[in-house]
Image (cartoon, rainbow, N blue to C red):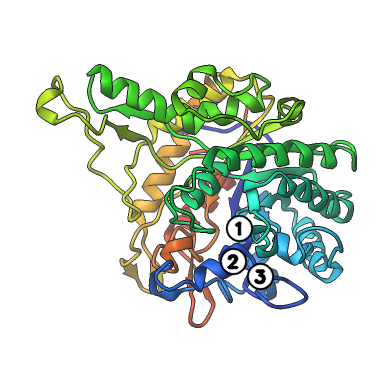
Amino acid sequence: MTRRFPDGFLWGAGTASYQVEGAASEDGRSESVWDRFCRIPGRVLNGDTGDVACDHYHRWRDDIRIMQDLGLSAYRFSVAWPRVVPQGRGPVNEAGLDFYDRLVDGLLEAGIEPFVTLFHWDLPQCLEDEGGWRVRGTAHAFAEYAAAVESRLGDRVRHWLTLNEPWVVAHLGHRTGQHAPGLVNSGTELDVVHHQLLGHGMAAQALRAGHAGSEIGIALNLEPKVARSDHPLDLDAAALEEGLMNRWFLDPLAGLGYPDDLLAASGWPASVVAGGDLDVIAEPLDAMGLNYYRTEVVGHPGLRDCDRPSPLRDPPPEITEMGWPVTPSGLGAMLRMLDGYEFEAIYITENGAAFPDTHRDGGMIQDEDRRSYLERHLAEAARAIGDGVPLRGYFAWTLMDNFEWALGYSRRFGLVHVDHATQQRTPKASASWYRDVIARNGL
C-alpha cells in the first residue's frame, strides 16, 4: 500500500552553519562560542573543530547539485551570527551576508525553497563574554541581527525559524556542560531559556516588520517521557521531565505563560521576567518546527527496581549509535500534541539517525538501518496527517555527514557520506531511497 503525502508537501534536508560551513576565519567572521569550546582540551572528541567542517562555504554549488539529484523541494540551513554581525551587535559584515545571498539565489535557481534558521547555537563569543544568553542584552542583539539578515534576504526567503532547540543551549550548555559555553550547574538554565524565548519574540517582530508574507516559526526538540513503571514517583518524575522539555517552551509560545505547576516544581524565581516579556514571547507563530529523535524512559532516581510494580518499562532494544532508542511512535505522539496547540502549520524540521555506516556494496554505503529508521518515522508522519495534523513538510537530518558537536566527526547522520580528509561527497543508499520517496510523494 502506498501512503501518499499531500500535494505541495515539502521534502527537505537540513544542516547547521557551524556543522558544515567551515571558513571559520574568512571574510570577517568572528569567533563563536563553539570555536572557543572546541579549543578547550577534552571538551570535543579527538580535539575536532568546525574550522573546515564540510567546507560548504566554498562547495555550496556542488551541494546544491546533490540536493537537486535528491529531488529536494526545500533546504533548511542556518546563518552564522558571527559571520553577519562579528561584534554580536552593531556593524553588519556585508561580506558575510554575501555568502547567504549567493546560497539563496542558487537554491531558488535550482527550484529549492530556502528555510532559514537564524540561530543554531553559534553565538558570537564576544556576546558570551558579556554574559551570553544569561543576560537580557543578548535577546536585543539577536533581534538586531535578525533584522539585518531579513533586510538582505527577506525579498526571497519565505520561511524563517528564529531559534533551533533552545532547550539544548540551556540544558547542555549551562547545566551539564556538554555543549558550549560549557557551564556546569550554573543555576542559570531557566534564565537562558527565558532570554532565548524573549529573543525569539523580538526577532519574530523584526522579521514581520520586513517583507510581508513570510512564514515565521521556531524549531523545538520535543520528546515524550515514559515512566519507568506505574509507581507514583516514576509517574511524577516522567511528568516533570516531559513538562520541562515540552510545555515549558510551548505554553509561553502559545500565549499561556510558563506553566504554574512547573514553576512551583522548578523553584525558578523568574526574577529575569520583566513586564511585557510574555506578550513578546507570544508573538504569533505561523509555523512550529519539530525536531524529533527519541522517546525516553524516565524513573525516579531514588527508587530501586524491587520497589517498582511490574512490569518495568525498558527502552526498546534498537538504538542508534548515539545510544538513542528508536521509537517512531513518539513522533506521532508529538505531532498530535502540537496539533492540540492549534499551530497553523507544523514542519518536522529534524529527524534522522547516526549509524556506523560500515556496510558497503561497491562504492555505496548500504545504510539499511537509516533507511528503515526514516521509513518508519515517515509512516508515523503520514498517519498523523491522516488524523488531521497540519504537517506541511519533512526535513531529514542531515543532508551530509558533518561536525556532530561534542562528538566531533565520530557520528554520521548524513544521507550523503563525506570523507572529511578529501571532502568527497558520496550519496548513501538511504539517499537513493529518499529520492524515490520524494519522486512518488509517498511511501
Tell me the kind of residue under disc 1: Ala
Q: What residue would you read off at disc 2?
A: 20
Tell me the kind of residue under disc 2: Val
Labelled pair 1, 3 in contact (Cβ < 8 Å): no
Q: In the picture provided, is 293 more to the left or to the right than 315? A: right
Q: Nearer the viewer, mark 1 or mark 3?
A: 3
Residue 427 on image: x %, y %: 49, 65
Q: Choose the circle earlier in sequence order: 1 or 3.
A: 1
Q: What is the CA distance from the residue labelled 1 to the residue labelled 3?
A: 16 Å
Q: What residue would you read off at disc 1?
A: 16
Q: In the picture provided, is 69 more to the left or to the right than 318? A: right
Q: Which residue, as the protein is rendered here, is positioned at the far left?
A: 306
In the displayed structure, would residue 209 be above or below residue 355?
above
Where, by quadrant of the figure, is residue 330 drawn?
top left
Where, by quadrant of the figure, is residue 430 drawn?
bottom left
Q: Nearer the viewer, residue 83 or 116?
A: 83
